[in-house]
Image (cartoon, helix red, strand yellow):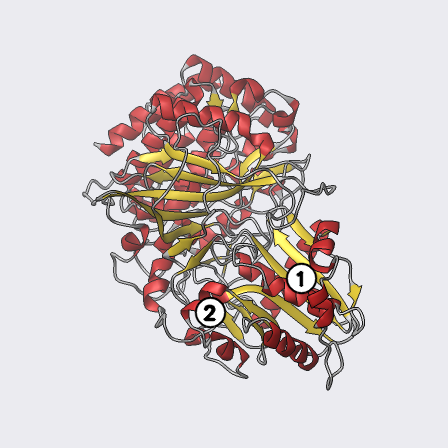
């Protein structure tokens, strides 16, 4: 019997399961109503609508990003799952520091413009006010403290030598690791000191309050650095699968539970504009500095972070940004050349904006917002987006919705914003992302199509605003070209509506309805000549009425381009959502097709079904250890192993094992999964078929209509009734 005939026969049969299996609890689709998010209900509110509870013994944490994926894969890795207490905190701290250091060392570039900016052509005033320690040897914290005291007397008090650098302070509560050690030196923001002029004294104290008496800086699972590049080094800035993993659905409980008096003088990285580390001799201050810079960039809303190391009498200045890490040469500072005080004078004279801060908090320690945008926060309107607004004014950034986890400089983030138009106040979502120019042609066409045609299941925009493409931070003159550095632009995208993550769904029926509309969005893209290529948990969301929407078109391309070498020789997507056929070495060069993205929708449904009750304190956890094990294999750097494990889903045993890993609340979810399984390479008929032959058969089945969008959507609509 032909495989297509077997598939047609199977499509007419229900999926059978063993009666005594734990999966019997999933036998029927729930039809109980559950309210959709209202227009006025934020993700935070949705997360807090249910009572909180402590983590169960079987709960597994969502850890940070894994190491950079294989250079053969133009994809991003998702969040691996690990048990809560697998390593001591000091071991995790050391590992994290090592990973950051290794990642940054690969990209660190000497920048002549940075050298000239901070050290070139000292002014007469700078030369007349050279400062050098009188009592202590240079390279010690005490000596630098002497220099800083002199700078303070000359300029202002925002530069502080911290006496308690081993102690921890707050970074950002939506990160797995919510604290970081104090730097040896901090430059406080103008906004923070204006809010509380006593803040420099607080930072100078030899001790301070332990941040919320929580776990230490590395009490969460280890954090790795993820790269996102095609094998030719190009790639859309895209960090991981889960917008919701770090969104306020999952963190609002922390916000409410651990919120402190915002007017209490308490240290936080939100107050810091720049950092410095000083060590005697050859001590490795650089590695510690990279951690502090990473912590600064984890605090919204930042474009770059400036820091310095002083090892003995050797001074080096760094800037970490979306394009990499730029540094000066290590310079010997002496009392005669006065370069140390010259650098500090120039750094202190920076505005908050020159120090990379795009918007400031309106209080000392509110890392969720509201935020006050800097005057030039919105760049010029992108000319290729012909339907968008040309300017934005009277915009207030209400709160952080989510931020993707990214240690070293490119953390895409989304915020809820309010736009006042007279007495009318409208609510939008705003995304900040650092983009490459090479992706713009197809993306602009897609955005204009969506705005003009308004297809179902896709996300229209209010406006797109973009800076010029640069390698160096905006405060440096010119735009020095550095080998290996791709110019990027800061792009601010305002969406017509604020969307909500799949974590807000309560029933299998709601999940089926959301997937049906999101797949309609994928179908609309296809019919207008594009393929999405990055279906993932974070890119499938729901609107205020619970209807699904497919977002993020940064990796979408025209169908006619999928056969081009650049697209064909690189895999696109987010691990662990990539189709098994795109992971297998035997199918390298396979054209990205519809059935590959349908398989990605299958893994999105699995990711949702693995998750425990979203309103509980365990919202970031998978309910069952088996789900964690499956997820980690899908997300592993071993692509062959991931492909083989996914192939097992085309067997009854493998599919049953998957169902047993689903959270208990998802009654009837096997019906949702079966619909997707039957329209991609996971169908049981492909269990023993070579991948290359599977591709040919899938093409035949989709071209004949035996597998199709229509079949999938009809099945989901039936489940929604």
- Which is more N-terminal, label 1 or label 2? 1
Judging by the rendered image, the residue that carries numbered circle 1 is 98
Depicted 73 relative to depicted 263: above or below: above
Q: Horizontally, is 632 left or right of 598 in the view?
A: right
Look at mark 2 in the image and give the residue it sits on: 193
Res 82 visible: yes
Residue 96 shows up from this direction = no
Left or right of 597, for residue 519: left
The one nearer the camera, 144 or 533, is 144
Give the residue drawn at x 56%, y 55%. Answer: 354
The local secondary structure at tag 1 comes to helix
> Label 1: how many residues lie within 10 Å, few (<14), some (14-19) or many (20+)?
some
Marks 2/1: CA distance? 33 Å
Residue ranking furthest to the left: 33
For residue 182, which quarter of the picture? bottom right
Q: Nearer the viewer, residue 507 or 218?
A: 218
Q: Position of residue 222 (x, y in %)?
A: 56, 61
Residue 393 in the image, given as x and y percentages of width and height: 36, 43
Looking at the image, which residue is at 57% across and 38% down? 468
Seen in the picture, residue 14 relative to 504 is either above or below; the reply is above
When asked about the image quadrant of residue 313, the answer is bottom right
């Amino acid at each position: 019997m032909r495989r297509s005939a077997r598939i047609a026969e199977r499509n007419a049969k229900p999926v059978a399961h063993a009666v005594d299996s734990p999966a019997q609890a999933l036998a029927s689709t729930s039809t109980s109503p559950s309210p959709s998010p209202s227009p006025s209900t934020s993700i935070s509110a949705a997360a807090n609508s249910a009572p909180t509870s402590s983590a169960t013994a079987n709960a597994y944490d969502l850890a940070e990003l894994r190491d950079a994926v294989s250079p053969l894969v133009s994809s991003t890795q998702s969040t691996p799952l690990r048990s809560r207490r697998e390593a001591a905190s000091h071991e995790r701290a050391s590992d994290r520091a090592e990973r950051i250091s290794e990642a940054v060392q690969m990209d660190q570039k000497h920048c002549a413009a940075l050298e000239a900016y901070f050290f070139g052509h000292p002014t007469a005033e700078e030369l007349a006010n050279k400062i050098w320690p009188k009592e202590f040897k240079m390279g010690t914290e005490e000596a630098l403290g002497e220099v800083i005291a002199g700078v303070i007397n000359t300029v202002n008090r925002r530069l502080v030598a911290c006496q308690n650098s081993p102690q921890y302070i707050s970074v950002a509560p939506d990160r797995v690791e919510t604290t970081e050690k104090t730097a040896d030196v901090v430059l406080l923001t103008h906004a923070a000191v204006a809010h509380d002029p006593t803040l420099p004294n607080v930072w100078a104290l030899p001790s301070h309050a332990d941040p919320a008496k929580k776990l230490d800086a590395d009490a969460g699972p280890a954090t790795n650095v993820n790269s996102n590049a095609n094998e030719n080094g190009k790639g859309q800035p895209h960090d991981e699968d889960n917008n919701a993993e770090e969104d306020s659905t999952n963190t609002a409980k922390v916000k409410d539970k651990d919120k402190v008096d915002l007017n209490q003088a308490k240290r936080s990285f939100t107050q810091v504009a720049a950092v410095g580390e000083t060590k005697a001799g050859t001590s490795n201050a650089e590695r510690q500095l990279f951690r502090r810079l990473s912590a600064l960039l984890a605090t919204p809303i930042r474009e770059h972070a400036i820091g310095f190391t002083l090892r003995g009498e050797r001074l080096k200045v760094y800037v970490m940004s979306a394009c990499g890490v730029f540094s000066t040469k290590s310079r010997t500072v002496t009392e005669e050349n006065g370069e140390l005080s010259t650098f500090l004078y120039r750094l202190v004279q920076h505005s908050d904006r020159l120090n990379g801060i795009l918007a400031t908090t309106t209080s000392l320690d509110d890392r969720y917002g509201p935020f006050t945008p800097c005057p030039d926060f919105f760049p010029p309107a992108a000319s290729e987006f012909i339907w968008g607004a040309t300017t934005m004014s009277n915009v207030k950034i209400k709160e952080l919705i989510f931020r993707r986890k990214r240690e070293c400089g490119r953390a895409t983030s989304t915020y809820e914003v309010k736009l006042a138009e007279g007495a009318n106040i409208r609510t939008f979502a705003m995304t900040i992302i650092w983009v490459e120019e090479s992706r713009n042609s197809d993306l602009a066409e897609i955005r204009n199509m969506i705005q003009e045609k308004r297809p179902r299941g896709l996300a229209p925009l209010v406006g797109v605003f973009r800076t010029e493409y640069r390698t160096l931070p905006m405060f440096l003159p010119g735009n020095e070209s550095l080998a290996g550095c791709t110019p990027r632009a800061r792009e601010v995208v305002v969406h017509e509506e604020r969307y909500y993550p799949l974590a807000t769904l309560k029933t299998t029926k709601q999940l089926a309805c959301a997937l049906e509309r999101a797949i309609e969005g994928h179908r609309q893209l296809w019919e207008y000549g594009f393929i999405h290529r990055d279906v993932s948990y974070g890119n499938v969301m729901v609107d205020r009425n619970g209807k699904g929407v497919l977002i993020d078109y940064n990796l979408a391309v025209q169908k006619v381009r999928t056969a081009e070498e650049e697209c064909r020789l690189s895999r696109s997507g987010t691990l662990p959502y990539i189709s098994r056929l795109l992971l297998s070495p035997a199918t390298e060069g396979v054209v990205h097709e519809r059935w590959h993205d349908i398989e990605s929708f299958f893994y999105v449904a699995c990711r949702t079904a693995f998750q425990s009750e979203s309103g509980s304190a365990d919202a970031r956890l998978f309910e069952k250890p088996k789900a964690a094990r499956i997820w980690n294999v899908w997300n592993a750097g071993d692509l062959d192993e991931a492909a083989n494990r996914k192939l097992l889903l085309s067997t009854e045993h493998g599919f049953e094992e998957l169902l047993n890993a689903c959270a208990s609340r998802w009654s009837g979810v096997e019906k949702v999964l079966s619909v997707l399984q039957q329209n991609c390479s996971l169908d049981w008929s492909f269990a023993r078929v070579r991948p290359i032959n599977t591709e040919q058969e899938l093409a035949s089945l989709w071209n004949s209509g035996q597998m199709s969008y229509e079949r999938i959507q009809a099945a989901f609509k039936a489940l929604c009734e």
